[in-house]
Image (cartoon, rainbow, N blue to C red):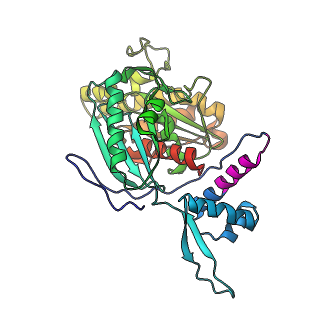
Amino acid sequence: MTPQGTRQGPGLATERTAPPTRRFASVVRAGSRVTPERARSHNRVLVLQELYRSEGLSRADLARAVGLTRVTISDLVADLIEDGLVIELGLRADARPGKPATLLDINRKGFAVVALDLSYDNLFRGVVTDLDGTVLHREHVEVVDVTGTDAVEAVAALLDRLVAAAQAPVLGVGVGSPGIVDDAGTVLSAPNLGWADVPLQGALAERTGLPVLVANDANAAALAERTFGGAQEDAILVRVGRGVGAGLIVGGRLVRGAHSAAGELGHVVVGTDGGEVCACGKTGCLETWLAIPRLQARLEAAEDADTRRAALAAAGERLGISLAPVVGALNLGEVVLSGPLDLLGGDLLESTAETIRSRTMADSHGGPAVRMTTLGRDIVVLGAAVMVLTGQLGVF
C-alpha cells in the first residue's frame, strides 16, 4: 500500500518534506560459522543494500554487483517481492537485441517508518517517513514539567497517534532520547525527564507490537549526519540544547563506549578557572558554558554587541578546549554542531574551530573541518529512521 497523503487533526502539522541525499556505510557481519540460514540472510541484505543505493537494477545487474549467481539472485528477489520489500518497475528501454531486462527497486513507498525525538525542552516531536526518509506527517506533544511515568505515557500516546496516521504498514519505530541509553534501549539516566533505568524500548514494543529501537539522541543525530548529511567516516557531532552531548563516528561506525556513554561531554569540567555551578553539582562543566538556556541568559544580560560576541566566543572556546583532545587522539576529520543556528553559528563556531586548531597538530594536516549541520530540526528523527532501516533491512 502506497501512502496517499496525511490526515490532519486539530493542531497537527502535515507538511511533506523532501528526502535528504543518502550516504551509505556497508553492513559488516562478525565472523562465525556460516550456516545456510545465515548466508541467505546476509545475501538478502546485500541485495537490499544494492537496490537501495542504486535504484532501478535488473537481476543481472544485481548478480554482477553483489557477486552472486543469477539463480541465487532470482530466488532471493522472488522472496523479497513476496515479502513486499522489492517491486518490479517495468522493462528497461534497451537497444540491445533480445528481451529487455525487468528493473527492480526497493518498495520505497510501501512501508512507513515512525521516528521520535524526545530531546527538546518542552515538547516531544515525531514523524512518519517512507523508506527514503521523506517526512510525510508530523506531530508533537507539549511536555512542560512532564517527567517520570507521565513522560513515558506522553511518548506512548504520541507514538499511538503517529502509527494511526501512517498510510502504509509500519516497518518499525526509532526513538532518540536524551540521557544514557544502553544496547537494550533502556534509558539508564535522563535527569531532565526524571528517568532512571526506564525500559523504554521494551515498553513501547509491548504496547504497539512493532519493532522498536531506542538510542541516545546525539547518537541518532550522528547516524543521520553520516547517512544523510555527508559527514566523514571519522567525525564527531555535538548536539547542543538543554544539555550538551555528542555522537562519535570512527571508521564509519558509531562508538557507544564501555558503558553506553561515549560522547557525554556535557559534564566534563572545562578548565581550572572555576565557573558556574552545574546541575550535577560540579563547577565549570561544559554545559554551564554552552547549554542553550545558560547561553541565552548570558546574551540577554550582555550590555552591547561586543559583550554578546565575547560571550559567544567564550562558549566556543570552552567547546574547543573539550573537543581538542578527542580530535587529536582520534585524528577526526570533522566536527559538526547541531542546535540553534543563530547561537551556534558565527562567533561561537569560529571560536570553536580556532581553539581546536590551536590545541592540535593542525599545521601538519589542516585540522578538522568545523561546521553546522544542514539537517536542521529533523536531524534526530532522521537518525531514528536510519536505526529502523538498519535494524529491519540492514540497508545502511
Which quarter of the picture shows residue 250?
top right
Judged from this view, the residue extending furthest toward the top is 281
Kindly tell me whether residue 259 is visible in this rendering.
yes
**What residue is shown at x 70% (from left), y 71% (from top)?**
60
Main secondary structure along the magenta-highlighted residues: helix
Residue 343 x/y as whole percent: 35, 37
Which of 331/2 is in front?
2
Which of 58/270 is in front?
58
**What residue is shown at x 46% (from left), y 14% (from top)?**
273
Count all numbered tags in the image, as a single digit: 0
Kindly tell me whether residue 336 is visible in this rendering.
no
With 368 as the anchor, is 67 left or right in this view? right
Q: Is residue 320 magenta?
A: no
Look at the image and give the residue range highlighted in magenta.
33-46
Residue 277 x/y as whole percent: 38, 13
Residue 158 x/y as whole percent: 33, 38
